[in-house]
Amino acid sequence: MFTLHHLMESRSQRIVWLLEMVGAEYEIKAYRRDPVTNLAPEAYKKLHSLGAAPLLEHGDLMLAESGAICEYIVQQTGTDELLCKADPKAHIDVQFWSHFSEGSFLPPLVTSMVLNKAREKAKPFFVKFIANKIIDAIMDAYFGKVIARNLAYVEAHLAKSAYFVGDTPTVADVQMSFGLEALQKSGKLTSFPNMTAYVARLHALESYQSAMSKMAEAEAQA
């Protein structure tokens, strides 16, 4: 039995979907974020020295990092088709999108979110004015350009394929789903029809619906 230690509003929701996809026996232990810092609570930090989500417990193992967790689940459940191991080219593509998600796609989005939170908290007016100028300059100089480049790249790719690698979901989709889901929820995909259609396809999947339902149930009990 796998135990997913799920921090609310975090990347760990992807692992719930993967566990559902492979038909694994699992439980979800949900944790609410600290109301002051919005970070993981002390109980979560005690599970692993990184104190970051997701965390997967399996026997004596407590595993961190989404990519490693995905590979471990596939290995343990014998579902190599989700890594496309039988097709070397497709396998490389799965690996690319998995690493692109964590290495290139999510970091600037998270940075933008953090900067916007800082913008909201800046007080009084003259401090807020200066903060806005600094944040705007940072976004214009680098992060805004990187985000725009990444969105254009993903949009173009999804014009050619129903999922990130082929016509059925793979680990590549598990890894990419969280960022696109967050963008869709915040209304930032309105000018990107391919990504919008992709998120709608995810929402229509029975495995995705079941995963989100079980996650919501676990969160309600936290």
Image (cartoon, helix red, strand yellow):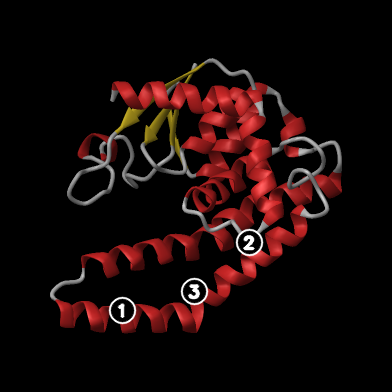
Residue under the image location 49 percent in, 49 percent down: 182
Mark 3 surroundings within 10 Å by alpha-carbon count, few (fewer than 14), some (14 through 19), many (20 or more)? some
> How far separated are the C-alphas under marks 2 and 1?
25 Å
Real-space CA distance between mark 2 and mark 3, rounded to the nearest whole angstrom = 19 Å
Seen from the viewer's position, the closer of residues 101 and 55 is: 101
Expressed as whole percent of the image width and height from the top left, the position of residue 98 reads 64, 49
What secondary structure is marked by label 2? loop
Residue type at numbered disc 3: Phe
Marks 1/3: CA–CA distance: 15 Å
Which quarter of the rendering shows the C terminus? top left
Residue type of the residue flagged with mark 2: Ser
Task: Decide which of 72, 82 is in the foreground and name it.
Answer: 82
Is residue 96 visible to us here?
no
Q: Earlier in the sequence, mark 1 or mark 3?
A: 1
Residue 117 location in percent, x, y?
A: 30, 62
Disc 1 on helix, strand or loop? helix
Check disc 1 and report the residue beneath it. 132
- Residue marked by disc 3: 143
Badge 1, how many Cα within 10 Å: few under 14, some, many 20+?
A: some
Taking the view exactly as shown, the residue that stands out farthest to the front is 190
State the residue at coordinates (49%, 66%).
108
Classify 179 as above or below 57.
below
Q: Is residue 122 above or below residue 178?
A: below
Q: Quadrant of residue 87?
A: top right
Task: Give me the residue at 32% from left, 44% from top.
Answer: 51
Q: Residue at x 79, y 55 (%)?
A: 159
Residue 109 visible at all: yes
Q: Nearer the viewer, mark 2 or mark 3?
A: 2
Mark 2 in CB contact with mark 3 (< 8 angstroms): no
Q: To which residue does mark 2 refer? A: 191
